[in-house]
Amino acid sequence: MEELVIDSVTLGSRLIMGTGGAPSLDGLGAALLASGTELTTVAMRRYSPDTGASLFELLERHGIRILPNTAGCFTAREAVLTAELGREALETDWVKLEVIADEETLLPDAAELLEATEQLAGRGFKVFAYTNDDPVLARRLELLGAVAVMPLGAPIGTGLGILNPHNIELIASRASVPVVLDAGIGTASDAALAMELGCDAVLLATAVTRAQDPVRMAQAFKHAVIAGRLAATGGRIPKRRHALASSSFAGRPDL
Amino acid sequence: MAVRKHVAVIGAGVVGLGIAYEALRRGHQVTVVDPSPAAGATFAAAGMLAPVSEHYYQEEQLLALTTESARLYPAFLQGLGPTGHQTNGTLVAGFDAGDRLALEELRRAQLAQGLQVQQLTSREARRLEPGLSPALAGAFLASGDHQIDPRALAAALLAALAEGGAALVRRRATAVVRLPTGEVSGVVLDDGTRIAADETVVANALAAPELDGLPESVRLPLRPVYGDILRLRVPPALRPLVQLTVRGLVRGLPVYLVPREDGTVVIGATSREDGSDAPSAGGVYQLLRDAQALVPAVSELQLEEATCRARPGTPDNAPLLGRITVGGADLPGLLVATGFFRHGVLLTPVAARICADLIDGMTVPAELLQFRPDRFSNSMEGSQR
């Protein structure tokens, strides 16, 4: 399967894992390994890189690249400051940009998101923009310099799956940067569907970290993303209203 | 008791004090070293003794320790002064349908471990606690989950230690003394003083890895997990706000209210790894918002205190407890008791029992010794690139 390339970095796995919500550091480590992920995102407002025996040490030990994120930011200003914090602490210009409108929905604030994307791109950041499932907004983010757009399937942590598959497909079909389905994933079939709709990767956290058996769920998503990608590129059959025998007397159409 | 030993305990949090007290009770000579006793996580802790409602998926191993410690608590407290020990149970509430579902599923895992959690109708829950919000989605009763006041417990332990002739040295320990043979023979203080001891217990939480003299092969993987916790006073007209400890899940976030006999209530606790050691405004807001969702009258209380302390977290959420193996044998003279994370108060009696049994050369059941302090040392070294 062809590898995922973002900002000239090649990733062997199309599953990106978040780190929030894990009950223990050991459990998180085991789940990350089971998922096969090569990229993981960490909330710079939630985890200090300065403390010993921490999450960062775990990720470094397992050789997993870190994508710092701006979770918990409500304004473009906060997001830019948090991104700078991540760049300084982790020596990467990658940032997953989250600018949230309110605590109730955790939905992205479109206006602040555009503003922050433009500012961050101007400061040399490689912006992975967490966005609504809005094809117009996704396009605008790409135009402003985002290196990846990350539309949500459903609000963060809900596990509701992909609420608007048509929009996700539209975003994926029009984008010239990688599209990562981010948030809302509940179970393996949701991740497979995201890939079938044309997304380049899937990002999830809660669906693994808050599962009863996180390692088992991580394995499930690893396979689901591979299966979905294969199906997306394998040329599925058209849907028909009537049955069509798999071995027909007519044989292969002779055109 | 076999031999009277001199036991030095580094760290006067509730765990260190508990170990010191048990050693004293068994006739040993005891010295406790701490620049500010009972001022760390002990000062913040709510004191829930909750092996049932604290049980979580895939933490079955820890259950042997938590349930044994809960069982030991009444005997451990005998002879101590007032500790605010209350045995009237814990009510667990779910705020919305998603919270109820999560609690129902967790209850299945708890029942599978033989723990007792009873499902309540909302009417039953509000008959027990009329102050609960009428709009909760579900409730459970864990009658085996009790509470204690950790500040009172620490004061009672300190008083009992003083009365029994134990020494309290208000200085910081910088090292353990190693003899040329390798064994540990006491403590070095920050002014250079040495305290000779037959057994040295490292119970100074997050500061443990900073002690010089510990075997180099041993790595104690501790990290600070900060918690914000509030203390509020219930105006006389509203008393009692609640009688049971009330724990809840509010839109996926945990919160608890622990009523004290003195008319205060403790509301906690956040879990932060952001490195900030002062109470977080967002944390305080979240706690009050979620506590009020469970018990609406929370907004009528007087806010007396917002405290932040660091819990000593380990990679598997279980303590670092017991002796350390060096070169295939236990290192004589050294015991470690740290990394109690969210369970320090609950696990104090069992930690005291285990350490005292090890000091006395007694056999400790294997299921209580599975959290050896050196269990991370080899794997960490092996996987480091």
Image (cartoon, coloured by chain):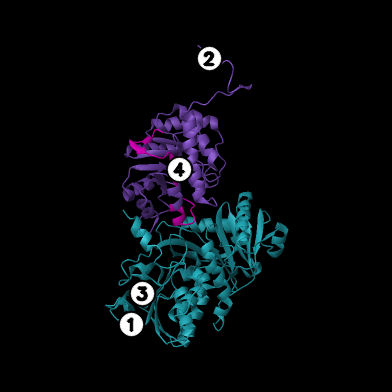
Classed neighbour count for the residue bearing mark 1: other residues with Cα under 10 Å, few (<14), some (14–19), many (≥20): some
Residue B147 at x, y percent in the picture: 58, 70
- What kind of element bears circle 2? loop
Amino acid marked by disc 1: Ile
Q: Is residue A7 located in the magenta-colored stretch of the structure?
A: yes
Circle 4 sits in a helix, a strand or a loop, which is it? loop
The span from disc 4 to disc 3 (Cα, nearest Å) is 53 Å
Q: Who is closer to the viewer here, A117 or B300?
A: A117
Chain A, colour shown: purple
Q: Are marks 4 and 3 on the same chain?
A: no
- Chain shaded cyan: B
Q: Secondary structure at mark 3?
A: loop
Q: Nearer the viewer, residue A38 or B211?
A: A38
Q: CA distance from mark 2 to mark 4?
A: 54 Å
**Numbered circle sitting on residue A99:** 4
Q: Is residue B171 left or right of residue B319?
A: left
Q: Do discs 2 and 3 share a chain?
A: no
Q: Is residue A91 magenta?
A: no
Kind of residue sitting beneath label 3: Leu
Q: Which residues are magenta?
A: A1-29
Q: Position of residue A230 (x, y in %)?
A: 47, 32
Q: Which mark is residue B195?
A: 1
Task: Please tell me which residue is depicted at 48% across the width and 40% down the height of the picture.
Answer: A223
Mark linked to residue B331: 3
State the separation of the CA atoms marked 1 and 4. Answer: 56 Å
How many C-alpha atoms fall within 10 Å of the one at disc 4: few (<14), some, or many (≥20)?
many
